[in-house]
């Protein structure tokens, strides 16, 4: 399974009013492991950044003036992400900008080039309703260090999001449990694959004890207990 964690930095908030992408960062994962095969590019947007956006990313017009334009890297980007699952925090923002840039070149929308797009902001809102779910908040919640993040950067933010995503979705393919190391007395965390877990059937004595408990619950409830109703349905 090939996944690409993607982030962009832009001159402002609205591509329809002329704002452009100035940085793209992509981090590759295969089978949930970072490969080190990343895509990173600064871009010349041919315009200044809004003051608010400049305060966020710190990429000045002077710094970007000798960088390639989006048209020069579009083919390389599309090839890098082709047929992968794309993971983005607040995907509608980044995809909106990518679509606007591709439209200028007469190219298909971004989603047509990839397997699917996963929005980690939507995932986080489902997992943590009513809580802050910015990238910084998720880094704190999942113990991902972002101490070196003084300004936003597309590649750095993609690397942080990759760690957050792996932590946030770890339960999909493994169980974490605290184990004591033999003789050391120190607790360590070990991930146990689901395929390695042995399901042991109860003994006849255990089944009889369970049935006796259910009968006692039925008697107290003056009918079938809730557990009995659930197992019968």
Image (spheres, rainbow, N blue to C red):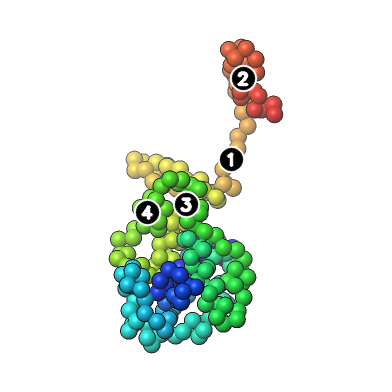
C-alpha distance separating marks 2 and 4:
43 Å
Is residue 35 visible in this depiction of the protein?
Answer: no
- The quadrant in which residue 162 appears is bottom left
Earlier along the polypeptide chain: callout 2 or callout 4?
Answer: 4
Q: Which residue carries the number 1 mark?
A: 198
Rendered view: 75 above or below 84: below
Q: Which residue carries the number 3 mark?
A: 124
Q: Dot 4 surroundings within 10 Å: few (below 14), some, or many (20 or more)?
A: few
Q: Give the residue at x 51% y 63%.
A: 92
Earlier along the polypeptide chain: callout 1 or callout 3?
Answer: 3
Q: Horizontal placement of 14 versus 232: left or right?
A: left
Rendered view: 190 above or below 33: above
Which label number is shown at residue 225? 2
C-alpha distance separating marks 2 and 3:
36 Å
Q: Give the residue at x 39% y 51%.
A: 132
Relative to the observer, which residue lies in front, 117 or 130? 130
Farthest front residue in view: 17
Label 2: which secondary element = loop
Label 3: which secondary element = helix
Q: Which residue carries the number 4 mark?
A: 137
- The quadrant in which residue 21 appears is bottom left
C-alpha distance separating marks 4 and 1:
37 Å
């Amino acid at each position: 399974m090939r996944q690409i964690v993607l982030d962009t930095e832009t001159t402002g908030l609205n591509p329809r009013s002329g704002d452009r992408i100035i940085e793209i960062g992509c981090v590759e994962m295969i089978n949930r492991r970072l490969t080190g095969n990343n895509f990173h590019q600064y871009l010349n947007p041919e315009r200044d950044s809004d003051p608010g956006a400049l305060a966020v990313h710190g990429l000045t017009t002077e710094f970007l003036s000798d960088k390639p334009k989006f048209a020069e890297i579009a083919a390389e980007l599309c090839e890098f992400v082709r047929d992968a699952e794309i993971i983005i925090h607040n995907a509608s923002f980044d995809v909106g900008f990518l679509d606007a840039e591709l439209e200028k070149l007469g190219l298909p929308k971004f989603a047509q080039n990839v397997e699917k797009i996963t929005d980690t902001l939507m995932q986080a809102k489902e997992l943590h309703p009513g809580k802050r779910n910015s990238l910084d908040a998720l880094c704190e919640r999942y113990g991902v260090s972002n101490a070196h993040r003084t300004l936003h950067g597309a590649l750095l933010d993609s690397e942080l999001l990759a760690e957050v995503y792996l932590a946030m979705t770890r339960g999909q393919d493994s169980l974490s449990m605290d184990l004591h190391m033999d003789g050391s007395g120190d607790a360590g965390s070990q991930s146990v694959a689901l395929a390695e877990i042995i399901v042991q059937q109860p003994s006849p004595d255990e089944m009889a004890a369970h049935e006796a408990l259910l009968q006692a619950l039925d008697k107290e409830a003056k009918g079938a207990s809730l557990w009995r109703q659930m197992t019968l349905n």
